[in-house]
Image (cartoon, rainbow, N blue to C red):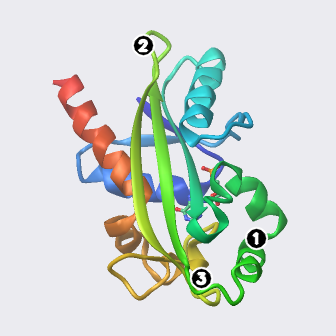
Amino acid sequence: MLFLVTSNIGKFKEARLVMERYGIVIQHLAIEKPEIQADNIREISENAAKEILKQHNKEILVEDAGLFIEALNGFPGPYSSYVMRTIGCQGILKLLKNETKRNAKFKAVLSYGTPEESVISFKGEIKGIIAHSSRGNSGFGFDPIFIPEGSNNTFAEMSISKKNEFSHRMRALKQFTEWYVKKMH
Ligand code: IMP
């Protein structure tokens, strides 16, 4: 049984929907992932997987994601959860006030491991822009201010399945599931 370890129910719902399409059932292990401070999300994600595996005798997936804003030299990037908790979407909009270059990227690194196997990671990213104001009520985190390439709506103005057509998480999950399905056969 495969568990997605996250305290974020939104992440779980998105992942469940993507994986259903591949016939993979995932369970939710609703615990806070251990998060080291590091400059890249791959290190954070892999470290979290290793720490969780020390305590849970399970097949797990854990993900670390971040919003990388070009005009801010990639900030908040690996510090996204801290920035979300402190200044939030409004703080980001303030930092980008009068900024015309609003390009940004969401990146996700999904790490898979079992107590027997070493951890393996899969990446996904989506380019987009930071909106001029916060829009929409669905999703979580920076969804109300991120407009993915190919849409005029923010992630928070989309249904889960619409967000999944674009998202960094879906792209990482797709890489993972293609590998996982082969591994299982
Ligand atoms: P983490 O991967 O849960 O550590 O995410 C870091 C921060 O980025 C958190 O504040 C999340 O809410 C935010 N975040 C992660 N993925 C997304 C997303 O798909 N949309 C919006 N915000 C996200």
Q: Nearest the camera: 141 or 12?
A: 141
Residue lying at 41% horizontally and 71% vertically, measured from the top left? 163
Label 2's element?
loop
Quadrant of residue 117 within the rendered picture: top left
Circles 1 and 2: CB atoms closer than 8 Å: no
In the rendered image, the vertical position of residue 51 relative to residue 31, given as above or below: above
The residue mark sitting in front, 1 or 2, is: 1
Dot 3 surroundings within 10 Å: few (below 14), some, or many (20 or more)?
Answer: some
Q: Quadrant of the C terminus?
A: top left
Residue on which the image places disc 2: 117
Label 1's element?
helix
Find residue 137 and name its label.
3
Q: Earlier in the sequence, mark 2 or mark 3?
A: 2
Tell me the amino acid under the disc marked 3: Asn
Query: CA separation, marks 1 and 3?
Result: 15 Å
Quadrant of residue 180 within the rendered picture: top left
Q: Nearest the camera: 168 or 101?
A: 101
Tell me the amino acid under the disc marked 1: Gly
Residue on which the image places disc 1: 88
